[in-house]
């Protein structure tokens, strides 16, 4: 069905005008527009001008012209879904590769809700504060998304609409007035001695590649995202160090990490004859030219943890907490832990040292508590 009706001439002898119908985006209804011709005195001029005007109007209607939409506000009449597609395509052009699936999913979640609520055909300017509030309530109540995850959704959707404001699609951010939820600390516990023992024994017997992957976290405090991007060339077994380049480090600071003797003896054989250009932890959790997604590490850990009966509050990254506990018990200083972990203090993970740490604590090589 067309969202317009072609122009025609209305002539009663006394009143002359050309009229046509077009959908007004504000109401969603076909509404009439008129152009009066009474100012033309000559009958032949009226007829000639009317014919030319009708042809011009109909040609413009066929090309999508809508007189209800002012040129300077034309982007506000973009369908919501099209506007969201613009945002995601714009972001995908410059964000990190690993962040792309998140933005694509954020768009899908909102689009699915719009379809469910029969709002998918609305224009972007019609997406209101109330719509945004209803949508976030749906995430909270119906989908059970809470805490940090809920706040991450909210931050991303605010970002979507800030970008739309920047590009003149809208003038206000409908997510601006929505409050973030209180965040509680994640219920994450270090390994107990017993849990550590059964985990280590299982890996050495059944999944040695993932044992090595786990030890990058325990001995070197390397994050999953860093583990999956480090190359063999970043490992110096002679100096017993691993270099984390600034480009892949979470805090964008280069880090030099010592390899403890307990771990070095495993790596000496494990990395023997492996080409420098291989990912340290690639496909199958072994050195490979093919990378893997960082999420595969936590997913694989949970599969193993469930199989051997580890509690739900023990995560892959609990290896780092376990390391911290063992080092403190062994009498290492907080400064040593800070340098190893890349933290400004041992209690946080979000504040980092300034500059590049290039000094290796020799005690970490010889006296690191064995896993």
Image (cartoon, helix red, strand yellow):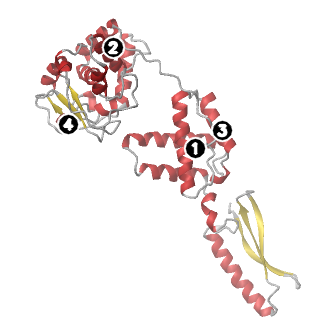
- Which quadrant holds the C terminus? top left
* Residue 197 point in image, percent of width and height: 29, 8
Sequence-first disc among 3 and 1: 1
Task: Name the residue beneath numbered marker 3.
Answer: 133
CA gap between label 4 and label 1 equals 40 Å
Q: Is residue 119 left or right of residue 284?
A: right
Which label sits in the foreground, 2 or 3? 2
Which label sits in the foreground, 3 or 1? 3
Q: Which mark is residue 111?
A: 1
Q: Is residue 14 left or right of residue 317?
A: right
Task: Name the residue beneath numbered marker 2.
Answer: 325
CA gap between label 2 and label 1 equals 46 Å
Around disc 3, counting alpha carbons within 10 Å, would you say few (fewer than 14), some (14 to 19), or many (20 or more)? some
CA gap between label 3 and label 4 equals 47 Å
Sequence-first disc among 3 and 4: 3
Sequence-first disc among 2 and 4: 4
Up-down relation of residue 156 to residue 256 (above or below)? below
- Total of numbered circles in the picture? 4
Task: Name the residue beneath numbered marker 4.
Answer: 278
């Amino acid at each position: 069905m067309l969202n317009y009706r072609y122009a025609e001439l209305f002539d009663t002898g006394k009143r002359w005008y050309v009229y046509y119908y077009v959908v007004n985006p504000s109401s969603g209804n076909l509404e009439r527009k008129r152009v009066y011709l009474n100012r033309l005195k000559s009958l032949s001029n009226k007829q000639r001008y009317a014919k030319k005007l009708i042809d011009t109007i109909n040609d413009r209607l066929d090309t999508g012209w809508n007189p209800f939409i002012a040129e300077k506000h034309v982007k506000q009449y973009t369908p919501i879904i099209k506007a969201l597609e613009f945002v995601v395509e714009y972001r995908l052009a410059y964000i990190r590769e690993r962040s792309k699936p998140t933005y694509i999913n954020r768009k899908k979640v909102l689009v699915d809700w719009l379809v469910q609520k029969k709002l998918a055909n609305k224009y972007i300017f019609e997406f209101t504060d109330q719509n945004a509030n209803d949508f976030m309530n749906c995430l909270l109540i119906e989908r059970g998304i809470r805490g940090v995850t809920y706040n991450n959704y909210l931050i991303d959707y605010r970002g979507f609409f800030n970008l739309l404001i920047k590009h003149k699609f809208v003038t206000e951010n409908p997510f601006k007035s929505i409050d973030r939820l209180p965040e509680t600390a994640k219920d994450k516990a270090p390994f107990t001695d017993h849990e550590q023992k059964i985990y280590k024994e299982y890996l050495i017997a059944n999944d040695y590649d993932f044992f090595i992957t786990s030890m990058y976290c325990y001995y070197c405090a390397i994050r999953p995202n860093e583990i999956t991007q480090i190359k063999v060339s970043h490992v110096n077994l002679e100096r017993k160090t691993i270099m984390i380049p600034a480009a892949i480090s979470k805090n964008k600071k280069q880090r030099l990490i010592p390899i403890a003797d307990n771990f070095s003896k495993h790596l000496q054989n494990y990395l023997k004859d492996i080409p420098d250009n291989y990912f340290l932890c690639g496909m199958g959790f072994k050195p490979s030219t093919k990378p893997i997604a960082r999420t595969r590490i936590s997913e694989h850990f949970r599969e193993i943890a469930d199989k051997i009966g580890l509690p739900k509050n023990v995560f892959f990254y609990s290896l780092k907490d376990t390391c911290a506990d063992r080092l403190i018990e062994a009498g290492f200083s907080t400064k040593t832990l800070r340098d190893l972990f890349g933290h400004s203090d041992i209690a946080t993970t979000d504040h980092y040292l300034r500059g590049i740490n290039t000094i290796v604590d020799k005690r970490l090589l010889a006296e690191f508590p064995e896993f």
